[in-house]
Image (cartoon, grey):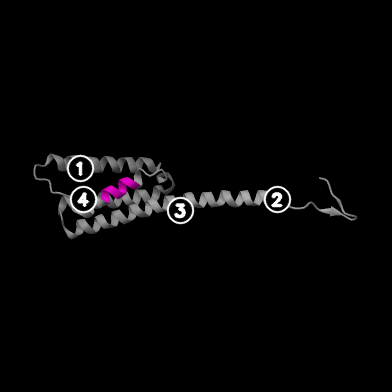
Amino acid sequence: MMRGKVGSLRRWIFAAALGLAGCGGAAVPSPELAAARVEVSRARWSPLAERALPELAEAEEALAQAEAEHLQRPGSAAERDAAYVARRKAERARISGLYAADLEVLHRARCSVERRRASVEPKESLPGGVAASH
């Protein structure tokens, strides 16, 4: 369900980029916007992106805002600020994916430890030192 929204946002960004390419005097994006594009792409194609879809959607929305600022006022402080926010949200998405994966590994490790403890615990013994059978 979230993938559909992310896909439509990608198409919008792609259409905006094509529109810019069609304009003869398209402005060069600020270094901040270029960095934000790279970071959002990095988060989008991360193997752990599926674990952070809400955060990834926020990053892509923030990038769309930065792209809109670039269209309206190329090189402005508003463009650079929006790009900074998009970059940070993309970093957050990547980190959230890593965090979710780490929590999953930790949970599996704890379950494994509990199973091993249960398998080596001494059986309850009956009076006289005879172990009970189950």
Discs 4, 2 touching: Cβ within 8 Å: no
Is the residue 91 above or below the residue 17 in the image? below
Of the residues tagged 3 and 1, which is closer to the observer? 3
Q: Which residues are magenta?
A: 36-42
Q: Determine which of the numbered discs, if any, sits on residue 118 in the image.
A: 2
Which residue carries the number 1 mark?
A: 17
Q: Tell me if residue 31 comes above or below residue 17 in the rendering.
A: below
Q: Which mark is residue 68?
A: 4
Q: Earlier in the sequence, mark 4 or mark 2?
A: 4
Amino acid at dot 1: Ala
| Nearest to viewer (mark 4 / mark 2) | 2
Crowding near the residue tagged with mark 4, few <14, some 14–19, many ≥20 C-alpha atoms within 10 Å: some
How far apart are the two marked residues, 4 and 1, measured between alpha carbons?
10 Å
Residue drawn 37% across the image and 55% down it: 92
Sequence order check, earlier mark of 2 and 3? 3
Q: Is residue 104 left or right of residue 62?
A: right
Residue displayed at 81% across by 53% down: 124
